[in-house]
Amino acid sequence: MEFLWAALKRNFDHLTNVLFSVGSEFSINSLLCALAIAATFLIWQRLRRGRRLRLPALLRALFPRRILRSPSTVADFGFCLFNTFVYGGIFGLAAISYQFLTNGVLDGLVAVFGKPAPSTWPVWASRSAITVMMFLAYELGYWIDHYLKHRVPFLWELHKVHHSAEVLTPLTTFRMHPLDTYVFGNILAVTAAIANGVGAYMFGDTTYQYVLSGNNIILVVFIHAYVHLQHTHVWIAFRGVLGRLFISPAHHQVHHSTNPIHFNKNLGSCLAIWDWLFGTLHVPSKAPEKLTFGVEPSEAGAHTITGEFIAPFGRSFAALAAMIPGLPRRTPPLIADNERS
């Protein structure tokens, strides 16, 4: 009974942290900020067009029935419940890799360049610098992970679970296969460890980034500003210079599009600079584009435990085997030759 009670308390504490910590990536306050921004944007659009503002119309625009009643939304809710408790364990393993790699980077720099000199920077300046470095490392790691998963067949079979969403809601962010999340966490561990090791060497000691509830404060700002809106139907497009610097909600909606011209585009999280630099940027139009989401052709068992959790293991291992010379090649089950990759 004590073990059961401890497990229940641990899960409850974790859920409380996810929902109510200021720096959580899925906190209630960040979701309310996204709702307020979406409502303000839709109100502004209606007023600009000279249309009357009515609460029922606004609620329908914010919460369309076709999205609320979609099997894809129901599946997203299930992913949310499952992955809320799985994420902690996966990123716990990545944290071990991160610390080990950080020490390795720092030791390597000392071996090549000698012991670091004490920093003459004020504490606020060094902490601000490492905060920016760690945020850029997160964004680069996110882009690298996303690029590989859209280019490497056996990784795509895992990441495809996320793209099987046929409507987008903030819950879609949880629509991730556990192995997909594991790869993501460890790629982030590599880029973050390099940034942290270089920062520690530059400033002569361990310099801590500015954080809220353990998350980089810059990322927290983006989460409260518009990241939740990336997985919605609300078309907010950044254009011009802004469209080349930041991944707007429309940028990411384009990323989920089934239109071939949008495949493998807009792979960043908050920033578009890596997409711009590496040629994977697609700046969306100002007017809403008519998009459909999902994976074509739709797979058997979409939005089910078998189709989204179990089948991707087999497809991923089959795709991996096909990449190894000497092994017999065959088309993995449930994959069509013309499927997007």
Image (spheres, rainbow, N blue to C red):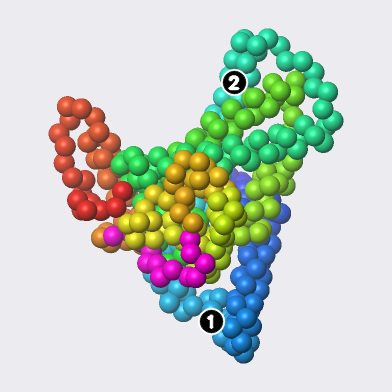
Alpha-carbon distance for marks 2 and 1? 52 Å
Magenta segment's dominant SS is loop
Q: Position of residue 287 (x, y in %)?
A: 49, 70
* Residue at image location 47% in from the left, 50% down from the top: 281
Q: Position of residue 182 (x, y in %)?
A: 46, 40
- Which of 79 and 198 lies nearest the eye of the viewer? 198
Q: Position of residue 161 (x, y in %)?
A: 38, 53
* Residue at image location 69% in from the left, 21% down from the top: 201
Check disc 1 and report its element: helix, strand or loop: helix
Tell whether label 1 touches label 2 (CB within 8 Å). no
The residues colored magenta run 284-296
In the image: residue 92, left or right of residue 262: right
Check disc 2 and report its element: helix, strand or loop: helix
Give the number of the disc on residue 60. 1
Q: Position of residue 21 (x, y in %)?
A: 70, 53
Q: Quadrant of residue 301?
A: bottom left
| Amino acid, disc 1 | Arg
* Residue at image location 83% in from the left, 23% down from the top: 120
Q: Residue 1, can we see it?
A: no
Rate crowding at label 2 as few (under 14), some (14 to 19) or many (20 or more) other CA atoms within 10 Å.
some
- Which of 63 and 84 lies nearest the eye of the viewer? 63
* Residue at image location 59% in from the left, 33% down from the top: 192
- Which of 247 and 123 lies nearest the eye of the viewer? 247
Task: Indicate whether residue 151 is drawn in magenta.
Answer: no
Give the number of the disc on residue 105. 2
Q: Is residue 335 above or below residue 155?
A: below
Q: Earlier in the sequence, mark 2 or mark 1?
A: 1
